[in-house]
Image (spheres, rainbow, N blue to C red):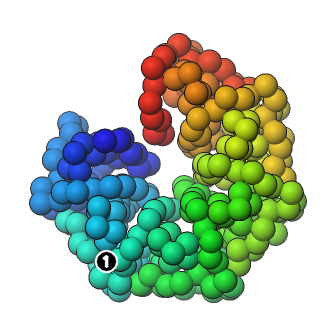
């Protein structure tokens, strides 16, 4: 049982069944229409869901048998169905079996396979599909990312940025795609059309990617951050963009990371939460609307999972 969120929609999966609510203008809730929902509504005919991800306008799930279903906005073929028509209810991606994890960006999608290889599809304008080019084109069906194997986790940016990351089995990280703010961690702002190893980054346990900033949870429970930092979302005590992975001072004992839109959250091993970055609408849960430049404890305990 878990929760998941898209930019304008939310989902709960309980005993393999999905309840969805929020914006539905492109049928991203999978309810067979384009009507927004204000309360959780069961997605009919869909059971045995193991993972759910939602991009800007599209949603995908992995079932317990390793197959994938997709629905919602599909203008850039981000559903991987070989077409560009929107889909109102869950539809199986026939080319995919044996899927371990999926990740959804704005208008592109990745699947990590059980054998450690990766498939990608959708928009490729910034080279975010990792195919070795920046061609302004779309890929309509799941296609192997060349030269990428031994992958443990894939993570994608969203909103205006289009970048991709692969956490490798050996604890290193490869990055590619858009890099306007140094979010790839490669030491500059050059785009990369193919998976490129981030220098000096080892011992990573989990990745969390925001619109243009990136977080890495290390094996020792500390966190490294890089990329866009206009509102302090890197937690480094300033608002300077950072082009290489940099340790967040004083942050340890972290269990899970979440990168929100210009803010960040850490679930601690003791069940508490720390938050930092943009807080214009009180999204950090700190009782005010003041941005935070460093991780700040939220007054909540006993937390098991975060979604933002």
Q: Is residue 75 above or below residue 33?
A: below
Q: Is residue 220 visible?
A: yes
Q: Which image quadrant is residue 146 in?
A: bottom right
Residue 239 place in picture, x, y as percent = 80, 36
Which one is nearer the viewer's eye here, 51 or 240?
51
Residue at 80 percent across and 62 percent down: it is 198
Q: On the rendered structure, is 112 left or right of 86? A: right
Residue 155 place in picture, x, y as percent = 57, 59
* Residue for badge 1: 93
Instruction: Count numbered badges in the picture.
Output: 1
Residue at 44 percent across and 81 percent down: it is 142
Rate crowding at label 1 as few (under 14), some (14 to 19) or many (20 or more) other CA atoms within 10 Å. some
Residue at 68 percent across and 70 percent down: it is 177
Q: Work out which quarter of the rendered image holds the N terminus and state it.
A: top left
Q: Is residue 18 visible?
A: no
Q: In what element is the residue under mark 1?
A: loop
Residue 254 place in picture, x, y as percent = 64, 32
Q: On the rendered structure, is 261 left or right of 91? A: right
Residue 148 place in picture, x, y as percent = 64, 78
Q: Is residue 4 above or below residue 113?
A: above
Q: Which image quadrant is residue 236 in?
A: top right
Residue at 23 percent across and 72 percent down: it is 91
Which one is nearer the viewer's eye here, 27 or 98?
98
């Amino acid at each position: 049982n878990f929760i998941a969120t898209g930019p304008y929609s939310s989902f709960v999966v309980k005993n393999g069944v999905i309840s969805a609510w929020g914006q539905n203008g492109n049928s991203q809730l999978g309810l067979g229409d384009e009507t927004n929902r204000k309360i959780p509504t069961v997605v009919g005919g869909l059971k045995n869901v193991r993972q759910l991800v939602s991009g800007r306008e599209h949603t995908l799930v992995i079932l317990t048998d390793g197959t994938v279903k997709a629905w919602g906005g599909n203008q850039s073929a981000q559903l991987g169905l070989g077409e560009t028509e929107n889909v109102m209810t869950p539809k199986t991606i026939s080319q995919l079996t044996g899927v371990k994890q999926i990740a959804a960006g704005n208008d592109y999608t990745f699947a990590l396979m059980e054998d450690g290889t990766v498939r990608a599809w959708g928009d490729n304008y910034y080279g975010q599909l990792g195919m070795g080019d920046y061609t302004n084109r779309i890929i309509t069906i799941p296609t192997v990312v060349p030269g990428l194997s031994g992958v443990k986790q894939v993570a994608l940016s969203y909103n205006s940025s289009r970048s991709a990351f692969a956490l490798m089995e050996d604890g290193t990280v490869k990055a590619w795609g858009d890099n306007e703010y140094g979010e790839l961690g490669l030491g500059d702002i050059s785009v990369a059309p193919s998976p490129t190893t981030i220098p000096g980054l080892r011992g990573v346990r989990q990745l969390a990617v925001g619109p243009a900033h990136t977080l890495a949870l290390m094996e020792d429970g500390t966190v490294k951050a890089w990329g866009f930092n206009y509102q302090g979302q890197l937690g480094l005590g300033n608002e300077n963009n950072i082009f290489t992975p940099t340790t967040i001072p004083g942050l340890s004992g972290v269990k899970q990371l979440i990168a929100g839109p210009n803010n960040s959250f850490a679930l601690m091993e003791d069940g508490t939460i720390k938050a930092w970055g943009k807080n214009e609408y009180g999204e950090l849960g700190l009782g005010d609307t003041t941005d935070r430049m460093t991780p700040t404890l939220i007054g909540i305990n006993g937390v098991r999972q975060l979604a933002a």
